[in-house]
Image (cartoon, helix red, strand yellow):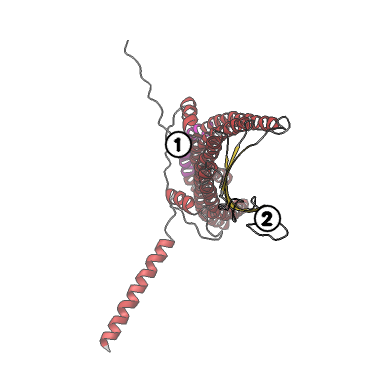
Amino acid sequence: MTNTIKHFVRVWLLASLLMQTAHAATDAPLQLDEAVALALADNPALAARQSRAEALAAVPDQAGTLPDPTLSLNALSFPTDTFSASQEAMTQKQIGIGLTLPFPGKLGLREQAADNEAQAAGEDVREQSQMLERNVRSAWWNLFYLDRALDIVLRNQAWLRQLNAIAETRYSTGLGMQSDVLLAQVELSKLLEMELGLRASRRNMAARMNALLGRKAFTDIILPAQASEALPPVADSEQLIALAQETRPLLATRRKLRDAAEARTRLAEKDYYPDLKLGLAYGFRSGNNPNGSARADLASVTLGISLPLFAGSRQGQAVAQRQAEWQQQDYELQDSVLQVTAQIEQALAEYQSAREQAALFKGGLIPQSQQTVSAMRAAYQVNKVDFLNLVRAQVTLYNYETQYWKTISNGWQALANLQAAVGAPLPAPKENTHENE
């Protein structure tokens, strides 16, 4: 009995440990790289694009293969009075096979067009993966900003409650004014309203993040309390634009679609030339010839060609259609190049602006505001600063701190946009070299 109890205790402790571990894993902060990996693995929209690419990858082999041959079983020239196989010399039971042979070059062009479309679909998967990563990074940094803003609001609420208590004490002792108490309560109500708005925004952003991760909308998302504030330097726009020409999957997709349209144009031009149809047949005959010998079997060979008699309304129009489709793809490629260039310029401008603003907040505005608030709070204790100016100084500090984290969030989001626009990890800026004179 004792051994049974000990065994039960061991099992219970092990189960408790496993449950605690699972719970800790569930409550573990969602790191940025982890969120990106989860999205790339579980996002259904990306999985749909991948399935489409896999489907198109199976098309080139089909397009480059000859049409299936046709097998025919024929009964020829049977007399209708007796349906005897030996009555007439022309009667025969025939088996044949037919094969369509496209004009040389057509199969290769069909396969080439399908292969280019399959490669375009593969590049589209890469493009969507990078767009998904950008969206996840943007949502993550938005959530991180909202968490920091909530922390600042809660901290300022606590500060205002303390200040309100001081104002009430001073008012009750005749050293302060009732307006100070009312002002503190008004500012506290404003912060409570801000808290409600921030919490609503966080719920919305968490639902968006869960959708990107392929999870239920109400799944809790806990982020780490700290993240990198250092926005790294990046290369200039000229270097990034040149890199994007080689690495952006969107441009590769457009090029492959244009190549596919070119192959289909050449295929339409080939349709002016006829396809061949080859047939082989073997006829079995019954009965005897007039001289008493057995009737010989018959072998047949047929050769047919397609005649482009309506070339003006069919082949000519098909060529015009394919040429217009090629022109469309070429224009879309040119437009995509311009769009990528604009995306890089815009994202780079936003990123550089965020870096400069973050440095200004971190190195100047916030420390100066903190010193101002500390000095004014001490002065207020000895009745050398009025309550309104103290509250204004604290509100200014609150705004600077909130704007700082918003700027950091915007900076990392702009960096994610920039990397997605380039289509590759961003290179470091080139070092300036000066020759010694």
**Quadrant occupied by the N terminus:** bottom left
Closer to the camera, 110 or 333? 110
Question: Could you say where residue 271 lies in the image, as x and y percent from the top left?
Answer: 63, 33
At 47% from the left edge and 42% from the top edge, which residue is drawn? 370
The residue carrying mark 1 is 424
Residue 367 is inside the magenta segment: yes
**Quadrant occupied by the C terminus:** top left
Of mark 1 and mark 2, the one earlier in the sequence is 2
Taking the image as shown, residue 330 lies to the left or right of residue 378, namely right
Q: Give SS at disc 2.
A: loop
- Residue 383 visible (yes or no): no
Tell me, for residue 68, which label it has, or none.
none
Q: Look at the image and give the residue range highlighted in magenta.
A: 349-376
Closer to the camera, 388 or 22? 22
Crowd tier of the residue under label 2, counting other residues whose Cα lies within 10 Å: few below 14, some 14–19, many 20 or above: some
At 43% from the left edge and 62% from the top edge, which residue is drawn? 26
Question: Could you say where residue 2 lies in the image, as x and y percent from the top left?
Answer: 26, 87
Question: Could you say where residue 390 lies in the image, as x and y percent from the top left?
Answer: 54, 45
The residue carrying mark 2 is 78
Residue type, label 2: Phe
Q: Main secondary structure of the magenta part?
A: helix
Residue type, label 1: Ala
Q: CA distance from mark 1 to mark 2?
A: 74 Å
- Residue 243 visible (yes or no): yes
